[in-house]
Amino acid sequence: MRFRPMLSIIITVFWSVVFARQVELPPSPPTVKRPVVDVYHGIKVADDYRWLEDGKNPEVIAWTEAQDKHARALLDPLPLHAEIGQFLKRLSSERSPSFYDLKNQHGLLFGMNSQPGQQQDVLVILRSPNELASKRVLVDPNHIDPSHSTAIQFFVPSVDGSKVAVSLAEGGSEAGTLHVFDVATGNELPDQEERITGNGGGSVAWSADGTGFYYTRYPHEGERPPQDMNFYEEVYFHKLATPVSQDSYVIGKDFPRIAEISLATSDDGRYLLLSVENGDGGQYEHFLSDSSEKWTQLTQFSDQIISVAFGRDALYMLSRDHAPRGKLMRVPLTDLELKNAVTIVPESTAVIEDFSFSLSGLRPAFVITPQRLYVTELIGGPTEIHIFDRDGRPLGTVPAEPVSSIDEIVPSQGDNILFENMSWVDPPAWFGFDATSHKTTMTTLRETSPVSFADVEEAQEFATSKDGTKLPLNIIHRKGSKLDGQNPTVLTGYGGFGLSQSPFFDPSLSAWLDAGGVFAVANLRGGGEFGEDWHRAGMLASKQNVFDDFIACAEHLIEAAYTNPAKLAVEGGSNGGLLMGAVLTQRPDLFRVVVSISGIYDMLRSETTENGQFNVTEYGSVRNPEAFKALYAYSPYQHVKDGTKYPSILFTVGENDPRVDPWHSRKMIARLQAANASQNPILLIGFSNAGHGGIGSAEDQRIAMETYWSEFIYQQLGVKWVSPVMEAQ
């Protein structure tokens, strides 16, 4: 998923029992210091481990292998390792098939399918969500690559559904190559496009007649200097059965260096919509091309139009201009000036969600049918679908599970829709909503859980942050659990990029709950749970609010007698890994265990990496004196203090991670190991053929990663393993 003398004695005794003749933890591999001093706006900053940034250096490779070998030698022999691994494998083999990222195209449902025992998910087509027998595998990465290191990044069907473009990437690198398949036969066409994805993602849109497609690509050799090869994304057009060398440039030369482009077409293929994000901070501009290939700029970054979707004769736009929780506007396709847009759904107390992230492209989280407008709205984390007519008159809500998440909405027939729904205790399922009867029906595309959550209690409480802000805190445990401050507890959070922490279903959590554990998810500023103001309160110079929020949530769990610092583990990944680094350096006394996955730790050097440059619109740049001041004030790597008793820490990385360079973890672990005054282990595990947090990894590799994360928490908190009873499917 995720100090005191007496504790040190307990840890030493535990490890002496596990390793028989060993009295204390074996030392971590030594790390030499080679100081480098940088000067930022007159301030000198020392860096003892700059040399660990060069991942191709044989000395760095040897150091990384030594750290990995050390960690695995400590964890692999433990009985917990085998027990947890076996449980996760059973979950994988006994779970039901799942379907996600559905797209209805020309009477066919395209979607991703995860099957028990299958290493990589496959692309399938179905006639309808209630005809499971009609499922046919269209693209199977398991057959394409027997090593199982190739994964589908995204897919886009043609307008008539006769072809599908699929991006495939290897080893978690997310550096995709586009392939084209014939839907009727499943045969691959000779057309391929390289370098369509990178730091800014990738996107494809078909021409109306299906004879070619528009695609994003990065510079080819000789087009840009070496340092710019993974920037300056542009749009090109490829005509099927012609050489790539004849592809034509379409648009993009004037876009920002860190532009991230998404493409979409109208249902009839007549219009091509281009969304351009300026890095990762949430600023967008939009362009539209008609059948004459004339481009019209619809919005600029300053207009605060976030997402745009096609209606029958108009564009619908989510605006945050003087509406931080969002309002929906409509502008006719015949008169596309923004000044002509009218507000049809005004801002309310709920937050209109911006996007649904899927493998078939970045989709607006609102859907327009012939006579209806379906809008996904957030209230502090949970989501629901509100219905409006085309003029914005409210028509109620779509019946769904209470306190749940709506992950996707897919137009069906007429004004009907399909939507995916899940909660903390209910596995994902696809439902059909009938606009006439206003009834919801579960389809055959649903997951079942091999473990029971029938006796799980879920509650939302509110923690109070340092500045008085109230923070939703979702808490899950078995009914009847004795809440006496002694429960082992895992707390997780994210707090960044406007991404919300909504209810999700994780069957592996059942083992933790069976063992008497508590699981808590914090809704922190920096996310989108309460709109753009909530996001902005946790970005740029306000980032410290996120860490204060998380600390407040941990203190709430202690004050409310769920747990205590000796029983509290925290976990997070990516931006959530930055969160872990910040809170473990700011409050090392508050946590017993920290698990951090693919985290960012040196905020002063982050933008020297390629993807780090896309993050400056969210975090800020050290080139700016005020932004540097804020970054330096919390950057975890610069705030590790010698002689501090740090909690038990496990970092994991994928060596092919394109989003967060693994050197962040290498440097942070080296610094923590040198500074630590406790007997707690500080470990780094690397996966050589993996990317960001397991993206693109085979099922066995994902299980291996989760085994280490879970094992470390169980072992360090002294939690006895209780193997859950599997239910018959």
Image (cartoon, grey):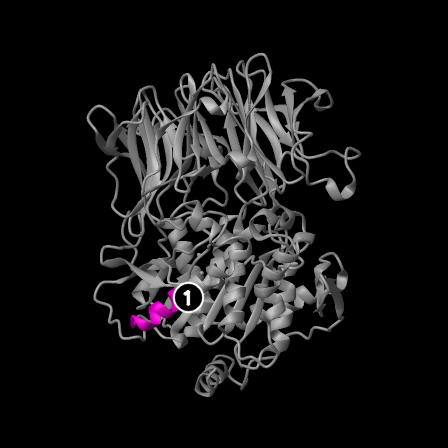
Q: Position of residue 3 (x, y in %)?
A: 48, 82
Q: Position of residue 53 (x, y in %)?
A: 71, 60
Out of 131 and 580, give the one closest to the viewer. Answer: 580
In this view, 520 is above or below 100: below
The image quarter in which residue 238 lies: top right
* Residue at (40, 35) in percent of width and height: 365
Q: Position of residue 360 (x, y in %)?
A: 48, 32
In this rendering, would 204 be left or right of 339?
right
Q: Is residue 182 visible?
A: yes
Q: Secondary structure at mark 1?
A: loop
Residue type highlighted by circle 1 = Lys
In this view, 340 is above or below 197: above
In this rendering, would 216 be left or right of 89?
right
Q: Is residue 718 visible?
A: no
Q: Position of residue 411 (x, y in %)?
A: 36, 26
Considering the whole magenta stretch, tell me its main secondary structure: helix
How many marks the image carries: the answer is 1
- Magenta residue check for 108: no
In this view, 117 is above or below 414: below
Out of 375 and 342, give the one closest to the viewer. Answer: 342
* Residue at (46, 55) in percent of width and height: 494
Disc 1 marks which residue? 466
Q: Magenta segment range? A: 552-561
The image quarter in which residue 176 lies: top right
- Magenta residue check for 560: yes
Looking at the rendered image, the quarter that the N terminus falls into is: bottom left
In this view, 567 is above or below 403: below
